[in-house]
Amino acid sequence: MRHRNSGNRNATVEIVREHVGEEDGSRPGIDSESSRRKILQWLAMAGAGSFLPGGKLLARAAMPAAAPTGRIDVHTHTVPPFYTKVMEKEILATGHPLPSWSPAAAIEMMDKTGVATSMLSPMTRVVQDSFSDKTERARKLARQNNDYTQQLVRDYPGRFGHFAALPLPDTEGSLREIEYALDTLKADGIGLWTSYLDKWPGDPIFAPVYEELNRRKTIIFLHSAPPSCCRTLQPGVADSVVEYDFDIARAVVSYLKSDSFRRYSNIRFIFPHSGGTLPVLANRVSETLPEKRSEKDSAEILDELKQVYFDVAHAAYPAPLAAITKVIPISQLLFGSDYPIFPPPVTEGPLDHFGFSKSDLQAINRGNAERLFPRLKA
Ligand SMILES: [Zn+2]
């Protein structure tokens, strides 16, 4: 198969050479101490927001604009002004200041790193924790978010897609927003969280929403979130250090336990971070979750997982990729970066050097996403 993305890939490799490290002659990726150091530098810059335009490092790595055959990044976020204003207190409470973000900065980063199209997801907690008294605010924030991202899709043709936010667990508001987002805004899918306070997605309270999403054959992007049980468990350790990735496994187990993957078989599910802790737990889950614990049940669970999609955002290192590729076929892997939380090279460098064949890499970078989003077919 011709590697349609080779031009952009080479451009990306150049950036990775410069920023992730190949100068010591060792295999790039995280095998060498120097590579690890470079990735940590990227992460530090991401934390400080210094990878944004005008940043010295990016200025050195000027690349031609991405061709329409470049990567499709299924995992990026916006940080709209209305969101930072309304959510100021909550954001401060998480101890994580949000990175600076603008559409122009996002496009510039995409051009420099060979990303043709980015799917925009709601920022974590944009409408989370919205039980009872916060329902109206959640409905308003979801609507504002969805109008905002759809405008970006219109303003930058071909460069953005979007997963619309819902004010879950507010069922009535969510059903209304599904109709608006999919019928009026023509969103590419819906962005949900792996949990809402102490409820995981297979919980019966979410069933009416899933039934509607199934009826509409929707693509769902599940973003990790810390459930209320497990926030600030250890002093000084942010939830994102481990809890986000544990919640991916909890959400998948919740779907399996409620038979949701089979019941809602029209929905295409995308999970982030190469599945977080799920791949290493997959056999344990398949052997111990079914009540009868038969070989047949176990095999069926593993088969169900093979239908699910996973992005590789910030989890393209040798260990997570080795694990996830033992659980699902290459056809289910998608490129994701988690920009602006992480700059794309944090994922691109290790992904490019994992050892995938050219055709597998092309499928992960673009081909698999084209199947999900036919409107992006080059
Ligand atoms: Zn993210």
Image: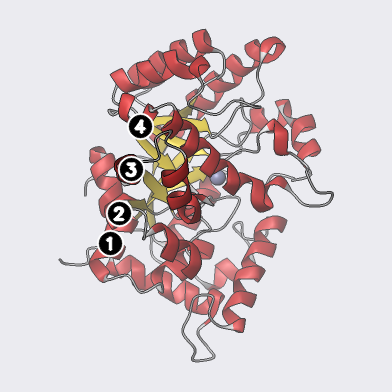
* Residue found 67% across the figure and 24% down from its top: 129
Type of amino acid at the residue the image marks with label 1? Gln
| 362 relative to 115 in the view: left or right | left
Q: Disc 3 to disc 4, how far (Cα)?
A: 31 Å
In the rendered structure, which disc, 4 or 2, sits on the residue that comes first in sequence?
4
In the rendered structure, which disc, 4 or 1, sits on the residue that comes first in sequence?
4
Q: Nearer the viewer, residue 92 or 36?
A: 36
Type of amino acid at the residue the image marks with label 2? Arg
Label 2: few (<14), some (14–19) or many (≥20) C-alpha neighbours in 10 Å = many
Q: Disc 4 to disc 2, how far (Cα)?
A: 24 Å
Q: Disc 4 to disc 1, how far (Cα)?
A: 27 Å
Helix, strand or loop under label 1? helix
* Residue found 52% across the figure and 43% down from its top: 249
Q: Disc 3 to disc 2, how far (Cα)?
A: 14 Å
- Disc 1 marks which residue? 362
- Disc 3 marks which residue? 158
84 lies above or below 31: above
In the rendered structure, which disc, 1 or 3, sits on the residue that comes first in sequence?
3
| 296 relative to 224 in the view: left or right | left
Circle 4/circle 1 CB separation < 8 Å: no
Is label 3 or label 2 in front? 2
Say how many tags the image has: 4
303 lies above or below 291: below
- Disc 2 marks which residue? 366
* Residue found 51% across the figure and 12% down from its top: 171
